[in-house]
Amino acid sequence: MNDIVFAGRHLLTKNVVRHKHRTWELIYCTGASGKLVFSGLELPYGAGDVAVIPPDTPHENMSGEGFTNIHLNIDHASLTFRQPVVVRDDANGSLLHLFADAYFLFSGEPERRAALLPSYGDLIVRHVCLCAHHRRNPMVEEIEQSIIQHFTDPNYELDKVLSAMPYCSDYLCRLFREEMHTTPGRFLTDLRLERAADLLLSDGQRTAVSEIARQCGFRDPLYFSRMFKKRYRVSPSRYAVMLLEETRELDSDSQKIMAPD
């Protein structure tokens, strides 16, 4: 659990091409600023921020001025984020010290690495969770949990959830966007599309696309196909085949994929 399988650092860098990892990736920005670009989502970051990226999430790192960072890949991380987030280090720079120590341990003597690195994995994951929890508005958490629990239900109505809360929908959407960097509606759709992509890959085209759509919360298969193609640049029926054809392994822990035109 929380095994650090890779630790590296970028000196002044302006772009990291679109790629993904089989493991969780945690990136501590040690200097300057930039943005992480995902499918339909951009997360700005600056010095003292930690980007938390779930496994198999394609992303690109961009900065006009150039950034510096320490990045870790953690296998079997006890993290519950459903999509990428950026959390802020505490005032003492606790995460910075942990990331720096983990990097030097990973690069150092095998004996010390084996003895100490597992503890750093646990500490880093726990600190990240504490930082994320500290900044989260309870209403945002309530909306997020409602969506996560019910997104596969085609009859789930997000508007009714928002209207039942003690603030106007516009205000709640603004709060949600400030913390999650996306709207509640987009968050719901993205969860459904990500689940559909997972099912299409694991199913081997045995199940009809209309049934996949229903299992992921879409009542209209045509709308599902349109939204899926808008996000992944390919139809649902072609997705698994395309990914197997175009994805190639570059090293033991990550996969690079071509960025869409």
Image (cartoon, grey):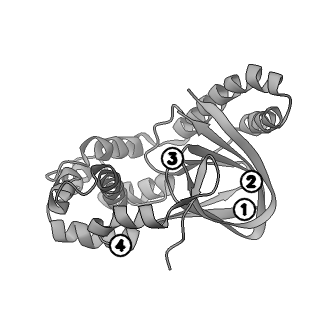
Instruction: Name the disc covering residue 54, or none.
Output: 3
Where residue 221 appears, as percent x and y from the top left, is: 16, 66
Name the element at disc 1.
strand
- Residue at point 36%, 64% (across, down): 241
Where residue 2 appears, as percent x and y from the top left, is: 59, 30
In this view, the residue in front, 143 or 64, is 64
Q: Do the residues labelled 2 and 1 touch (CB within 8 Å)?
A: yes
Q: Say which label, 1 or 4, has the lower sequence index.
A: 1
Q: Can residue 252 be seen in this view?
A: yes
Q: Name the residue under label 2.
A: 47
Q: In which quarter of the image is the N terminus?
A: top right
- Neighbour tally class for label 3: few under 14, some 14-19, many 20 plus, Cα within 10 Å: many
Which image quarter: residue 231? bottom left
Q: Say which label, 2 or 1, has the lower sequence index.
A: 1
In the rendered image, the residue lying farthest to the bottom is 261
Q: Say which label, 1 or 3, has the lower sequence index.
A: 1
Q: Name the residue under label 1.
A: 33
Where residue 191 appears, as percent x and y from the top left, is: 34, 53
Q: Mark 4 points at which residue?
A: 234
Q: Say which label, 3 or 2, has the lower sequence index.
A: 2
As measured in the structure, the alpha-carbon distance from the residue carrying label 3 to the one carrying label 2 is 21 Å
Residue type, label 4: Val
| 161 up-or-down from 38: above or below | above
In this view, the residue in front, 171 or 256, is 256
In this rendering, which labeled residue sits more in front, label 3 or label 2? Answer: 3
